[in-house]
Image (tube, helix red, strand yellow):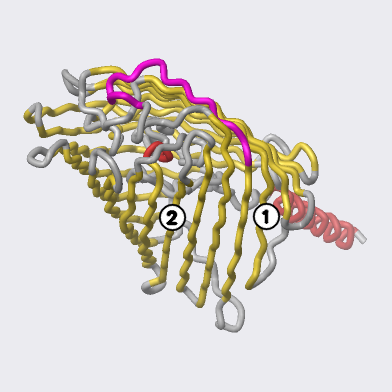
Amino acid sequence: MRRFLLCSAVLACVAGSVRGSAQTTTPAQATPPQTTPPQTTPPAPTPRPPARQQPQTGSGRGTKSLSLSFDVARGRDDNSVPDAAPGGDPIGPFGPLDSGTITSVNAGANFAATKGRKSVEASALAFTSQSSAIDDNLTTLAANLQAGTSLGRRLNASVGGNVLSQPTVFFNPMAVSADGAALSPGPMQGLTSQRMISGGPTASMTYQWSLRHSTSANGSLFRQKPQTGSGLESQAYGFSLNHAWRTSRRLTTNVTYDFNDTTQDVSTTLDQVVRTHTGRLVLRYERALSARRNVGIEVGGGITRGDTSGFDGVSEFTEPSGRVTGHIDLGRSWSANAGIGRTVVVLPGITTDPFLSTATDLGLSGNPLRRCQVLLSASRADGSPKLLQSNSFETTTASGRIEVNVFRALSLFGSYAIYEHKLVGSGIVAAGVPGRYRRDSVRFGLSTSWQVWGARRRR
């Protein structure tokens, strides 16, 4: 009897320990959502550990999908241009339009295919708008192509490219995020009749040394050229090398090196070149608060060494850089993010100068109701000159959007956005860019999207 009771107690302890360990197992860490609209400046590489390859399942025939989207909106833009300096007279064929009502139509398509360890994704976007300030329609055309494959069990590679043709001020001229990259462009940033075409190829490779160590290399080439009127033609290429070490289940350490070279045509005989070398150490911490709530913080710092050559001769500079970003899930459907960063940036197509920029951004998104989604964001950036005779800038942005799903594939939305910048100094600035500019935009419309080929997605 004693033996039986002793065995029962041992089995109960073992079962309790197994049950306790199952309850405390941390679910897979979720990476905070990243917004990747078409970029108009070479994006600053964000160090992060590459995603692990998931085992392939199924019959091996692969999957294919095609989805379409369509938006129509109407609203009003209020433009304020207190002064014209330093980019010249902004009122005219190359500057922001007068205030007026806007009617816009946006159509897009996305195709994705996977087979085994190979994948292809292509997207296209067409946006057209009619303003009461002018007689002509203003259009934006964008195309993007990405392809990836596994070259063995440990090596992954991908290539891609994009092209973008749009009115000049569409590309959010002086709005910078905490990591130094240009903020997302959007149809409410401003409308001009001057056009720019931009784009270029990208390539990346990742080698998974082990479950804890991986090394990735990324390269990009970017060109921007005015199609109409005057402007600063620019070309940039960049390279980054990153090693990620997963030091624990929640902590990842990244060591990153970035190189960027930006050349802008000041005149037919003179170019302005800015080169930067940046080394960074970044720590990323992720933790699951519950089955549906995660929190993460990323802290990084480093040194940027750069030089400029052009009409002012050759100048060199060395500056510390760093950033702190974080995100948290506030409930079952709400999440918030914030970031602050200090880095050296260049604004292709606007000015030839490098800036030491300090930027902050905030974001909040969630579903107050089952079929209602709310998106809020705000940012502020300022840039101090790195040359004796150059410009400085300040930028403030804020936006809000509410979307209500009426049917499975149809939604109604309303949005409000503010963009304001101030540019002062004696450096070279593209014609038509006002020294001070504010834009308030309101939109109401409907949006629809549906999967015409492949597995249906739940809304």
**Residue 328: quarter of image:** top right
Marks 1,2: beta carbons within 8 A: no
* Closer to the camera in the image, 37 or 426: 426
Residue where numbered disc 2 is placed: 142
Disc nearer the start of the sequence (1/2):
2
Query: For the point 19% across and 42% down, which residue is it?
Result: 263
**Residue 398: quarter of image:** top right
Residue 394 is left or right of residue 397, and the answer is left
* Closer to the camera in the image, 300 or 163: 163
Query: For the point 57% across and 45% down, which residue is it?
Result: 104
Q: Is residue 396 above or below residue 28?
A: above
Q: Amino acid at mark 2?
A: Ala
| Residue 456's disc number | none
Which region is colored magenta? 74-90
192 magenta-colored: no
Task: Sort mark 1 into few (<14), some (14-19) or many (20+) by Cα contacts within 10 Å.
Answer: some
Quadrant position of the N terminus in the picture = bottom right
Residue 401 is left or right of residue 357, and the answer is right
Residue where numbered disc 1 is placed: 448
Residue 196 lies, in percent from the top left, at 33, 46
Query: For the point 72% across and 49% down, which residue is it?
Result: 411
Residue 306 is left or right of residue 32, and the answer is left
